Amino acid sequence: MRVLDPMIEAIGQYGPGMKPPTNHEVRVTQLKKEVKHTEDLMKYHKEDCAKYGCSIMVDGWTDKRGRTLINFLVNCSRGTMFVESVDASSYSKDGQKLFELLDKFVEKVGKENVVQVITDSATANVLAGRFLEAKYEHLCWTPCAAHCLDLMLEDIFKIPRLKKTFERGIAIHGYIYNRPTLLNIMRRFTNLKNLIKPAKTRFATAFLTLSRMHQQKNNLRKMVTSEDWTSSKWVKEPQGKRMAQTLLMPSFWNTVVFALKVSGPLVKVLRLVDTEKKPPMGYIYEAMDRAKECIASSFDHKEEKYNEIFEIIDKRWDVQLHRPLDAAAHFLNLEFFYPKALEVQKGHEVMNGFYECMQRLVPDVTVQDLITNEMSIYMKAESLFGKSVAIRQRNTRAPADWWASYGSYTPNLQTFAIKVLSLTCSSSGCERNWSVFEHLHSKKRNRLEQHLNDLVYVKYDRTLRLRYDMRNTLDPISLQNIDESNEWLLGRMDGESDGDNEPVFDDDDGLTWATVARTSRVEESSHASRATSKRSKA
């Protein structure tokens, strides 16, 4: 349905004689009503913030006029709510000033409600986060996981051979798409498939570009060896010659496969933390472990092939993402705890992280003691935790929902678990409405400056509410599946590919939370078993 359809239908239902609202009514009277209505929609959101705590999500961006605008949102178990947009051009690099701004919003939301503040890992934000933790001993500053993962990908694509390969891929795309006749020929060979689709970040786009080119490898090679190409004017152009040589170069495709093997699992984790469908805090720890395992398995655990990649991952993960809050969420996520309960209990890393997180988020020592006393019931799966229905639903319900249903015999641990497992770990949701801010902060709308935040508040929060209402709350996050079209994980260094495959994953909301559990070894075993079965039947 088009955006204007409901309005047109409502006007038609009114019938003849309808008078349009005056300028004052639209800008003042009706806007105030819409703000009040939006506040009513957010009522339960605020109640959940007070009950289980919330995250303040902060993200800055630069508009076309060179100004630094910072968006502030609040995320809790009921979704994300926009609070305000601030022009911070004069102090965006000043850690002290940013701390004062963050402090203001913590007080505005209610310091007793805030569990964490999420920003990107820019130097000024890190300093502001430290100041914030020093003032408020009960909350955490957390670097945005999506930003950290994107920095990992950026570092990986700085490796000279990967950088050169991506530049060659972009050059091929640019050469084809700047020549309409050649573009039509390519589409004929690729069955109308495109070679690139922009993602939310530059380096996710790099991955998607190389993956789509790899899927079309055979078709692209056929194109530059066809009569259409050899009889064309492009075959004599220097750029055309280089493009054809690159597409026929085995080393180019081998490096493409290498790039996909090392970046594919990380892009899947990036998609996991960048969504608003489910709270990802309870999954990031396990997802990163499985991503690394997937990368290692795709190279048959020959460390010399991926050591450099692991150094890049560990540098970002250990310094920025590997935090007590992640460890606590991992411990409280029953899907991962119970299958490895003994291993987790003996693991100093996870248990230390849990206790550090608990001591920070629960400053009352009496409540801390109650939580530790109740932990044995959870760890031994006693009381409701051991009921068959609770056991069945460990892998089918979101962890916070599971704790809400079966944690009543451990009320203090239950409250703490829901608080931690309801958290997001990324501020990327702040970025979803840049065009709105761009428009409303522009010169042509400056006469509406007094109404700016009301306009954005209404539009943004209505959109966020709609996204929340459309989510599928019963669909659990799964780390067990990996798309079988990820042929580079099967070790096909010869680059064989079905040119008609759909893209590995598109940048849309239909992507599941599938990430990186199934390694290439499992995949190869599965394919081998099917092949053996077919031969035996024959």
Image (tube, helix red, strand yellow):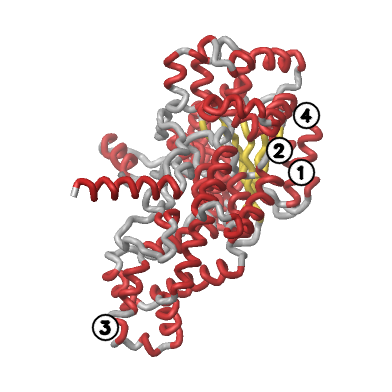
State the residue at coordinates (45%, 26%): 397
The mark that comes first in sequence, 3 or 1, is 1
Q: CA distance from mark 3 to mark 1?
A: 62 Å
Hey, what amino acid is under mark 3? Answer: Glu
Q: CA distance from mark 4 to mark 3?
A: 71 Å
Q: Label 1's element?
A: helix
Q: Label 4's element?
A: loop
The residue that label 3 is drawn on is 227
**Residue 136 appears in the rendering:** yes
The mark that comes first in sequence, 2 or 1, is 1
Q: Label 3's element?
A: helix
Instruction: Identify whether 170 is placed above or below 94.
Output: below
The residue that label 4 is drawn on is 137
State the mark number for residue 128: 1
- From the viewer's perspective, is 187 left or right of 260? left
Instruction: Identify whether 439 is placed above or below 102.
Output: below
Asked if the residues shown at circle 2 and circle 1 are in contact, with their CB atoms under 8 angstroms apart, the answer is yes
In percent of width and height, residue 205 lies at 49, 59
The residue that label 2 is drawn on is 141
Disc nearest the viewer among 2 and 1:
2
Front residue of 142/311: it is 311
- From the viewer's perspective, is 64 left or right of 353? left
